[in-house]
Image (cartoon, helix red, strand yellow):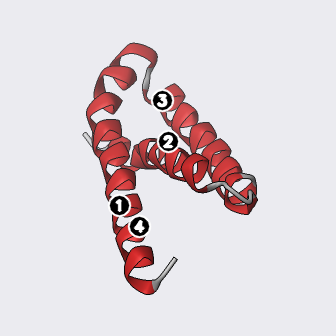
Amino acid sequence: MGKAEAARMASIETGLLSIGTIVSCLALRPMAERIGRRKTLAVYFVGMAASIALAFGWAFYLSNGLVPFIALLVVLGFFGGNFALFSLWLP
């Protein structure tokens, strides 16, 4: 892949990661109201650890792992939205 194609791919992957984070921020409040803030944060931290391990420990090293890596970036973005829970904790 050339430089221009790599830059385009990185932009797409960053956009997908950001979309996952936005969806996460929208889903966080109902989840926290249903199961509680602590359990929600635990779900997010476990999901983040698992998605990091899968994306960068497995899919990144596959010979044809671009598609699974990109899919896992969306999951990583979702669980990376755990920072939105801290705004619920402050009040």
What residue type is disc 2 on?
Val
- Spatial separation of the CA atoms under disc 4 and disc 3: 32 Å
- Residue at numbered disc 1: 12
Q: Are marks 4 and 1 in contact (CB under 8 Å)?
A: yes
Dot placed on the residue nearer the N-terminal end, 3 or 1: 1
Select label 4 or label 3 by which is in front.
Answer: 4
What residue type is disc 1 on?
Ile
Residue at the spot 31% in from the left edge and 57% down from the top edge:
15
Q: Which mark is residue 40?
A: 3
- Residue at numbered disc 4: 9
Q: Secondary structure at mark 2?
A: helix
What residue type is disc 3 on?
Thr
Q: Secondary structure at mark 1?
A: helix
Number of callouts: 4
Q: Are marks 4 and 2 in contact (CB under 8 Å)?
A: no
57 or 40: which is nearer to us? 57
Asked whether, in this view, residue 30 is left or right of residue 79, the answer is left
